[in-house]
């Protein structure tokens, strides 16, 4: 009899995805120190950029996407990078962890689909990242002098959600890579770090060398950074970026799920599903 998760694709069932998310939350909660340190590290990261920004007080802000200061610019970069990293690398990390703990095969013989597995495993890290992003921006606004008075709450939510959806496609794709090559997390990390670096996470794209600036303007991460900065600092001008991210997700997610399904099938046929 075939594993249930190899049944023909169907719409993911919310209760199945939520069950996997709840399981991962309970596991994470049982290790309280790493849970807390995630928040502490983010605050320390904000503090570093806050004091770095003091070095550049008084410089022109025309290239900062509407941000009133370099720190405000970098704070958005930090917040959205947390979400992008979770959406794109969480599934790969969770699959690797399931392989190492020996629970991946047990999960895959349950009556769940590939869609439910992929979205379920990535669900908790993504939701946790969303909470962290909001928390970091609140800290920046309340204690670190970032002016959020012009922010559009609707724009903030929509850009953050569409960014998460868009980069979940990359996450599912990279999850398939980990199934096949096992130690693909290094590649995953390099891809995400490189995309963020050239697309405006911590400095404007305009300061890049001429030969790489065009690439920085078209990678999907750039739309996430620009859209969130427009929503937070201008309260407008974020629709085009949100639409670009939405289109990316509508095209990318089905392709990524198909690739993940093929990688899962290959791992089963080769008998390497639980190898690490």
Image (spheres, helix red, strand yellow):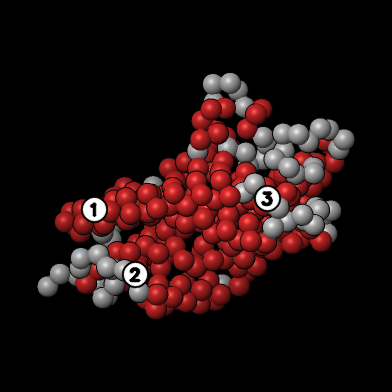
Give left or right: position of 224 versus 136: left
- Element type at mark 3: loop
Residue 150 percent location from the top left of the image: 77, 54
Give left or right: position of 73 versus 253: right
Decide which of tag 2 and tag 1 comes sooner along the chain. Answer: 2
Decide which of tag 3 and tag 1 comes sooner along the chain. Answer: 3
Residue 97 percent location from the top left of the image: 41, 62
Total marks placed: 3
- Element type at mark 1: helix
Q: Is residue 176 visible?
A: no
- Element type at mark 2: loop
Mark pair 3, 2: CA separation = 34 Å
Mark pair 2, 1: CA separation = 18 Å
Task: Kindly report which numbered mark, 3 or 1, lies closer to the viewer in this rendering.
Answer: 3
Task: Determine which residue is flagged by label 1.
Answer: 262
Task: Determine which residue is flagged by label 2.
Answer: 12
Q: Residues within 10 Å of mark 3 (few under 14, many from 20)?
A: some
Labelled disc at residue 236 = 3
Decide which of tag 3 and tag 2 comes sooner along the chain. Answer: 2
Q: Residue at x 47, y 52 (%)?
A: 246
Could you tell me if the residues under marks 3 and 2 are in contact, i.e. CB atoms within 8 Å?
Answer: no
Q: Residue at x 27, y 75 (%)?
A: 110
Residue 165 percent location from the top left of the image: 47, 56
Q: Residues within 10 Å of mark 2 (few under 14, many from 20)?
A: some
Task: Kindly report which numbered mark, 3 or 2, lies closer to the viewer in this rendering.
Answer: 3
Which quarter of the figure is the N terminus placed in? bottom left
Labelled disc at residue 233 = none
Give left or right: position of 133 versus 161: right
Q: Is residue 105 above or below residue 236?
A: below
Can you name the residue that lies furthest to the right here?
Answer: 58
Q: Residue at x 62, y 49 (%)?
A: 238
Could you tell me if the residues under marks 3 and 1 are in contact, i.e. CB atoms within 8 Å?
Answer: no
């Amino acid at each position: 009899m075939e594993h249930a998760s190899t049944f023909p694709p169907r719409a993911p069932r919310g209760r199945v995805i939520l069950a996997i998310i709840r399981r991962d939350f309970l596991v994470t909660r049982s290790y309280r120190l790493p849970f807390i340190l995630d928040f502490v590290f983010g605050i320390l990261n904000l503090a570093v950029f806050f004091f770095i920004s003091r070095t550049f007080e008084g410089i022109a802000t025309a290239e900062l996407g509407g941000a009133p200061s370099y720190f405000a610019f970098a704070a958005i970069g930090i917040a959205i990078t947390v979400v992008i990293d979770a959406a794109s690398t969480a599934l790969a990390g969770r699959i690797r962890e399931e392989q190492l703990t020996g629970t991946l095969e047990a999960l895959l013989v349950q009556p769940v689909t590939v869609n439910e597995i992929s979205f379920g495993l990535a669900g908790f890290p993504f939701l946790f990242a969303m909470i962290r992003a909001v928390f970091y921006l609140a800290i920046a606004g309340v204690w670190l002098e970032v002016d959020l008075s012009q922010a559009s709450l609707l724009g903030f939510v929509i850009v953050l959600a569409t960014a998460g959806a868009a980069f979940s496609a990359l996450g599912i794709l990279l999850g398939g890579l980990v199934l096949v090559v096992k130690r693909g997390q290094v590649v995953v990390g390099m891809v995400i770090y490189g995309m963020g670096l050239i697309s405006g996470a911590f400095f404007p794209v305009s300061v890049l060398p001429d030969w790489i600036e065009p690439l920085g303007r078209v990678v999907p991460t750039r739309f996430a950074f620009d859209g969130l900065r427009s929503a937070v600092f201008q309260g407008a001008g974020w629709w085009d970026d949100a639409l670009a991210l939405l289109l990316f997700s509508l095209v990318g997610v089905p392709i990524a799920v198909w690739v993940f399904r093929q990688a899962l099938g290959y791992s089963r046929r080769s008998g390497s599903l639980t190898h690490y």
